[in-house]
């Protein structure tokens, strides 16, 4: 895989003594978190995550940041620090580590998660993943890196205090203040207060995901009773769809099932992977036994609880298979209960609602976070952000982890909380953390993961896919002799443009106009005549301009 789009990226003259922040991702969109910090000519990276593609990149599911800037400086990159084990913070490691080839530092749970992920890419023995203690610290050249435990929807999330000879910045990562986190310990508030007590924290690079939420803070520990009661009143099979990485929710559901004498079945490979990682890391040790479908083949439905992947409507995940009745082991029936213990990520609404509707049409009882309190976000609402700012007392706030609507609102809110300065950044902006000023910016972009290839969003391949998806294609094939005379009737295929039977008359018109073009001598003139004639016919029927592909074989 090559970074081909920014081969001529400008090389900057950076004052080696400046303490700088440079996001390559994680702002302007949710996901794809990648941040760089610079001091004394050296760099560290915090997180290396994936993003998720939208309809603008057909055939692409995952996005990764353009790392050309730091790849050109990899000899000065001292390490990658991973805040936690969510894909949008560490999922790009298998795709991009070979471009950087530096050590990775994180705590035990995330170490185990990364090793499982790297194993899938046959990189486990190549990538040096080094374990750091919870609330531990390491020195990397001129940087002191301190891990500060913070609650989130996955074990061992950490905020990172980056300290240098000229001051410190707190990179919060994803976080919330949860007094009852179910899995792991509560946030290290005392350490955050110590940092604020010194009064010299230069900047907080802070999570913006829930800045628009007007809700009160939610605790994972408050979910148990509601889920227990829903399962208790359900008379038949119960299935729960969630984010596979939400280990605390898996624990909550399995404990409720255990108390109600239901066997817990995991549906989805990513669930089995995360359970293994959690148990290897010392979590989920007192949960109900997790079973496969074959283990409960002879049990009555009312004794079974399914935990499923695919809460965002992913087509190949277990939830979708249950919704379209294609799952090999289970078929949902009238009177069953389907619990969606998650929120819908913006952009997935239509896909998820289609699944809701499919279950409802079967007579399945559908429970969502809109109807029952069965989900707690892992990100801070305004009250928690206000508390964070009151604890750490930064001189400046740099909102990240959000679209621009989130970071813009966060800038205003940080100032309301008494932070002297708050600035919006875009990918590629370079901020001097001492002065609190943007000093420059670089061109950065992102790539879609297409198998083992990387596709730039405006590449000819992606542009062609968009056009084919939106307008279809007309493919003309013809066989001619050396004098460009037709040897057989031309063939016309019009996928996504015309119906083979219903629109046969139009296709025959196109075939005739193709035949008439072969009276010309020049192959170039023949092709031009075919294309212009087809477009002339299309204008009578369509408002779109399909791709026209002319294939002429000379024998």
Image (cartoon, grey):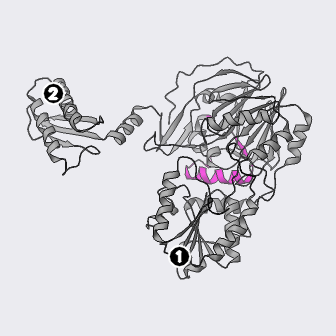
Q: In this view, does 88 lie to the left or right of 279?
A: left
Which residue is labeled 1 in the image?
335
Say if residue 181 shows up in the picture: yes
Residue shown at 77% from the left, 41% from the top? 160
- Residue 222 lies, in percent from the top left, at 75, 62
Q: What is the crowding at mark 2: few (fewer than 14 residues within 10 Å), some, or many (at least 20)?
A: many
Q: Horizontal and vertical percent for residue 84?
A: 70, 48
Q: Name the residue under label 2.
A: 526
Look at discs 1 and 2 and give the one toward the viewer.
1
Is 400 or 70 nearer to us in this picture?
A: 400
Residue 121 is one of the magenta-drawn residues? yes
Q: Find out whether the residues at labels 1 and 2 contact each other: C-beta distance under 8 Å.
A: no
Is residue 135 depicted above or below 202 in this figure?
A: below
* Residue 126 in view, yes or no: no
The numbered disc on residue 167 is none
Q: Which residue is drawn at 62% across and 61% down?
A: 341
504 w.r.t. 270: above or below: above
- Along the horizontal axis of the image, is 32 left or right of 110? left
Q: What element carries label 2?
A: helix
Label 1 residue SS:
loop
| Residue in view at x 69 percent, y 28 percent | 76
Q: Distance between the residues labelled 1 and 2?
A: 65 Å
Q: Give the range drawn in magenta.
A: 100-126
Q: In which quarter of the image is residue 473?
A: top left
Q: Residues within 10 Å of mark 1 (few under 14, many from 20)?
A: some
Horizontal placement of 439 versus 234: left or right? right
């Amino acid at each position: 895989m090559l970074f081909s789009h920014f081969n001529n990226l400008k090389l900057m003259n950076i004052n080696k003594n400046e303490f700088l922040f440079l996001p390559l991702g994680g702002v302007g969109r949710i996901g794809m978190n990648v941040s760089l910090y610079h001091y004394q000519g050296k760099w560290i990276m915090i997180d290396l995550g994936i993003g998720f593609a939208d309809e603008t990149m057909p055939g692409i599911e995952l996005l990764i940041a353009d790392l050309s800037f730091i790849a050109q400086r990899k000899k000065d990159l001292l390490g990658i620090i991973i805040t936690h084990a969510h894909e949008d913070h560490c999922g790009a490691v298998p795709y991009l580590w070979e471009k950087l080839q530096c050590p990775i530092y994180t705590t035990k749970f995330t170490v185990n998660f990364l090793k499982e992920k790297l194993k899938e890419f046959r990189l486990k023995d190549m990538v040096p993943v080094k374990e750091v203690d919870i609330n531990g610290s390491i020195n990397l050249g001129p940087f002191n890196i301190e891990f500060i435990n913070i609650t989130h929807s996955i074990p061992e999330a950490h905020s990172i205090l980056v300290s240098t000879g000229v001051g410190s910045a707190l990179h919060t990562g994803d976080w919330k203040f949860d007094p009852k986190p179910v899995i792991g310990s509560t946030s290290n508030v005392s350490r955050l207060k110590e940092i604020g007590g010194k009064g010299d924290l230069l900047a907080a690079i802070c999570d913006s995901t829930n800045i628009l939420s007007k809700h009160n803070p939610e605790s994972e520990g408050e979910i148990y009773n509601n889920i227990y009661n829903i399962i208790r009143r359900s008379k038949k099979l119960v299935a729960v769809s969630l984010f596979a990485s939400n280990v605390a929710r898996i624990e909550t559901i399995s404990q409720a099932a255990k108390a109600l004498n239901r066997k817990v079945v995991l549906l989805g490979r990513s669930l089995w992977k995360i359970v293994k990682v959690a148990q290897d890391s010392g979590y989920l040790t007192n949960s109900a036994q997790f079973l496969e479908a074959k283990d409960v083949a002879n049990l009555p439905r009312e004794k079974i609880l399914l935990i499923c992947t695919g809460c965002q409507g992913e087509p190949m995940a277990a939830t979708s298979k249950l919704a379209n009745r294609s799952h090999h082991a289970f078929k949902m029936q009238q009177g069953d209960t389907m619990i969606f213990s998650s929120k819908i990520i913006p952009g997935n609404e239509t896909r998820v609602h289609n699944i809701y509707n499919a279950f409802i049409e079967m007579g399945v009882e559908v429970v969502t976070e809109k109807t029952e309190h069965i989900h707690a976000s892992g990100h801070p609402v305004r009250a928690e952000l206000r508390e964070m700012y009151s604890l750490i007392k930064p001189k400046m706030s740099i909102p990240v982890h959000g679209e621009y609507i989130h970071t813009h609102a966060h800038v205003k809110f940080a100032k309301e909380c008494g932070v002297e300065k708050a600035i919006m950044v875009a990918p590629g902006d370079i901020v001097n953390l001492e002065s609190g000023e943007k000093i420059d910016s670089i061109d950065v972009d992102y790539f879609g993961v297409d198998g083992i290839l990387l596709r730039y969003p405006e590449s000819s391949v992606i542009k062609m896919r968009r056009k084919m998806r939106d307008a279809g294609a007309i493919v003309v094939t013809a066989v001619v002799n050396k004098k460009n005379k037709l040897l057989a009737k031309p063939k016309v295929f019009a996928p996504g443009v015309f119906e083979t039977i219903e629109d046969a008359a139009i296709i025959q018109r196109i075939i005739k106009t193709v035949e008439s073009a072969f009276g010309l001598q020049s192959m170039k003139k023949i092709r031009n005549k075919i294309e212009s004639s087809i477009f002339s016919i299309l204008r009578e029927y369509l408002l779109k301009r399909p791709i026209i592909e002319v294939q002429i074989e000379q024998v």
